[in-house]
Amino acid sequence: MKTGHDCWVIAVLAIFLLNGCAGLLVGGAAVGVSVAHDRRTTGTIVDDQNIVLNLYTALNEGLPPGNRINIDSYNRTVLLTGEVVSEPVRQRAERIALNIEPPVRRVHNELVVGSPRSLSDRGGDTLLGTQVKTALFQVRIPDFDPSRVKVVAENGVVYLLGLMRRNEADAVANVASRVNGVRQVVTLFEIID
């Protein structure tokens, strides 16, 4: 026979367990919605996240100080942007990226040799990337979803990554090129037609 204390303990445990389950369900639903719109597999999305984390650690351990390197990964293709202290460091960063786990299929090394850019300049990149991402809602193609495009802005250059059909890729590049402040558009799409 259960006492009042036992029932109270069971009730508290049930609340904690239900809260935990609700969090998992809510989190799972959020992930599910994100994955539903992405053309990458769930495993590839996780690989991309792990590539960024592992590469961040490897570059911090394997390169001298004084660099500012941004790392982006989409479908196991890595984009390196930012500034490094020398050409040998630039090349070393690429070699490290090519040998990271999970395996990287390709590296686009857009690092430049020079002093790290100021925080205000980088803030402009953030704003530019947001403006490009917002402008992608102008693309009116059946089944096109702007969330499938990864936008990276660096010093007025906009890099576009994603798994795109040819007509989507062309339309996205065209819209991005018309955003005020964009100096150049670099398409790194994988075409899936």
Image (cartoon, rainbow, N blue to C red):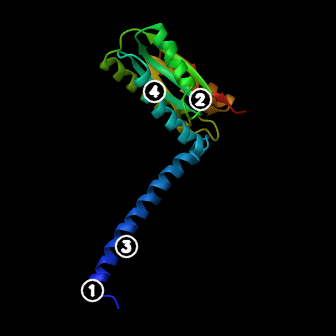
Residue 27 position (above or below residue 101): below
Residue 86 position (above or below residue 131): above
Residue at x 44%, y 23% (from the top left corner): 59
Give the residue at the far right of this rendering: 193
Residue at x 40%, y 68% (from the top left corner): 18
Disc number for residue 184: none
Residue to which mark 4 is pinned: 58
Quadrant position of the C terminus in the picture? top right
Residue at x 43%, y 29% (from the top left corner): 57
Mark 4 or 3, which is nearer the eye?
4
- Mark 1: secondary structure: helix
Give left or right: position of 149 versus 155: right
Residue 166 location in percent, x, y?
68, 28
Of the numbered discs 3 and 2, the one sitting upstream in the chain is 3
Quadrant position of the N terminus in the picture? bottom left
Amino acid type at mark 1: Gly
Residue 49 location in percent, x, y?
50, 37
Disc number for residue 104: 2
Of the numbered discs 1 and 2, the one sitting upstream in the chain is 1
Q: CA distance from mark 1 to mark 2?
A: 58 Å
Give the residue at the far left of this rendering: 5
Q: CA distance from mark 3 to mark 2?
A: 44 Å
Disc number for residue 4: 1
Q: CA distance from mark 1 to mark 4?
A: 56 Å
Amino acid type at mark 4: Ala
Answer yes or no: is residue 5 visible: yes
Q: CA distance from mark 4 to mark 3?
A: 43 Å
Q: Are marks 3 and 1 in contact (CB under 8 Å)?
A: no
Disc number for residue 14: 3
